[in-house]
Image (cartoon, grey):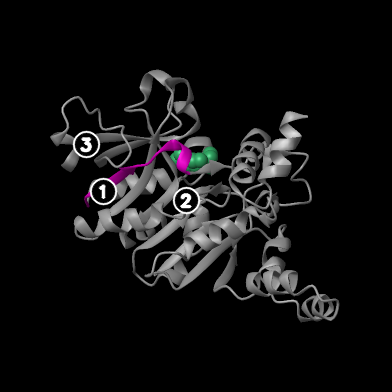
């Protein structure tokens, strides 16, 4: 089974910082964002390879995941084995690349990796969203297995005034939520049967407050439907539109996660918050971080 990581976007929300450094290569603590995403993508036992859909203008991502024996030898000759091991590891993960020549939307980027999925279900992980504990994908797989291999997307509740930033689901909670009186279905762990989805709705048009956070487990039918998907919102080929067409043919589910389980690193504010949260929790950086905050 493959994990697809679309990482071809222009990073406009983080300019000028992303003018020459792709947003996926910005470091969070001491590793680029994309390394967290790749590690998460490879965490489920079923996944044997990760396909990064990059842009020809972002060669740094492929360079990062390529071995550099010269640099490794130099570091080792200077006794810096810890760093040599770290870069050797980054160059050894099962990652391959394909390229999206123009930014034509998330659906188009996913479609660029169709050669790799060979008619199997596949994960999609947005390349600027970090999930430190890597636990969302295995839980999505469990929900999918419990529903005959159906597609499952991860969603979280957002305030009403933020719905226009995301893909918002329509549907109803199923399963365990019905056993808890007073539950709304927005609670972490709830599972929804999804019947529709709207990309970036106006506040009054949103069918729920649950937004797609950027983790998808999709059936092969979604990939087939992407092959003739026409442009939608923003004149881009939207993954949301292909998923909506699939919902008319197949069961489709959403797993509600805690909104604080993952971090969007694609804006300066989100990137700063991600670094702050991870630094505060990392014994290597916590003391220096606290001292800086108290100064
Ligand atoms: C994409 C998806 C959207 C999702 C969002 C999560 O939008 O199209 O459904 O909610 O990612 O960040 P984008 O942020 O690329 O505009």
Which residue lies at the image location 44% right of the left edge and 73% below the top edge?
Answer: 48
Q: Looking at the image, which residue sits at the far top?
A: 204
Task: Please give the label number shown on residue 150.
Answer: none
Which residue lies at the image location 36% right of the left edge and 56% below the top edge?
Answer: 217
Q: Mark 1, mark 2: which one is toward the viewer?
A: 1
Which residue lies at the image location 43% right of the left edge and 68% below the top edge?
Answer: 2
> In the figure, 143 relative to 207: above or below?
below
Look at the image and tell me in which quarter the C terminus lies: top right
Category of crowding for the residue at label 1, using alpha-carbon neighbours closer than 10 angstroms: few (below 14), some (14–19), many (at least 20):
many
> In the figure, 270 relative to 131: above or below?
above
User: Which is nearer the eye, 8 or 50?
Assistant: 50
2 on left or right of 90: left
Numbered disc total: 3
Tag 1, which secondary structure? strand
Give me the C-alpha separation between circle 1 and circle 3: 12 Å
Residue at which label 2 appears: 107
Residue at which label 3 appears: 173
């Amino acid at each position: 089974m493959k994990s697809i990581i679309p990482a071809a976007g222009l990073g406009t929300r983080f300019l000028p910082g992303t003018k020459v450094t792709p947003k996926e290569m910005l470091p969070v603590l001491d590793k680029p964002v994309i390394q967290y995403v790749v590690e998460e993508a490879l965490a489920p036992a079923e996944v044997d390879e990760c396909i990064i859909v990059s842009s020809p203008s972002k060669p740094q991502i492929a360079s990062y995941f390529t071995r550099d024996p010269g640099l490794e030898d130099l570091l080792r000759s200077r006794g810096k084995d810890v760093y040599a091991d770290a870069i050797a590891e980054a160059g050894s993960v099962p990652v391959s690349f394909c390229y999206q020549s123009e930014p034509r939307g998330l659906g188009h980027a996913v479609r660029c990796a169709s050669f790799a999925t060979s008619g199997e279900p596949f994960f999609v992980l947005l390349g600027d969203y970090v999930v430190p504990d890597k636990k969302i994908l295995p839980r999505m797989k469990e929900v999918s297995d419990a529903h005959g291999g159906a597609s499952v997307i991860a969603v979280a509740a957002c305030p009403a005034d933020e719905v226009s930033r995301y893909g918002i689901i329509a549907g109803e909670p199923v399963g365990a939520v019905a056993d808890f009186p007073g539950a709304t279905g927005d609670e972490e762990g709830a599972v929804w049967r999804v019947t529709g989805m709207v990309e970036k709705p106006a506040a009054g048009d949103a069918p729920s407050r649950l937004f797609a956070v950027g983790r998808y487990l999709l059936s092969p039918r979604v990939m087939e439907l992407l092959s003739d998907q026409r442009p939608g919102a923003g004149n881009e080929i939207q993954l949301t539109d292909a998923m909506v067409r699939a919902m008319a043919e197949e069961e489709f589910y959403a797993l509600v996660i805690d909104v604080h389980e993952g971090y969007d690193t694609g804006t300066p504010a989100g990137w700063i918050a991600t670094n702050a949260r991870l630094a505060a929790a990392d014994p290597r950086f916590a003391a220096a971080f606290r001292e800086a905050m108290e100064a």
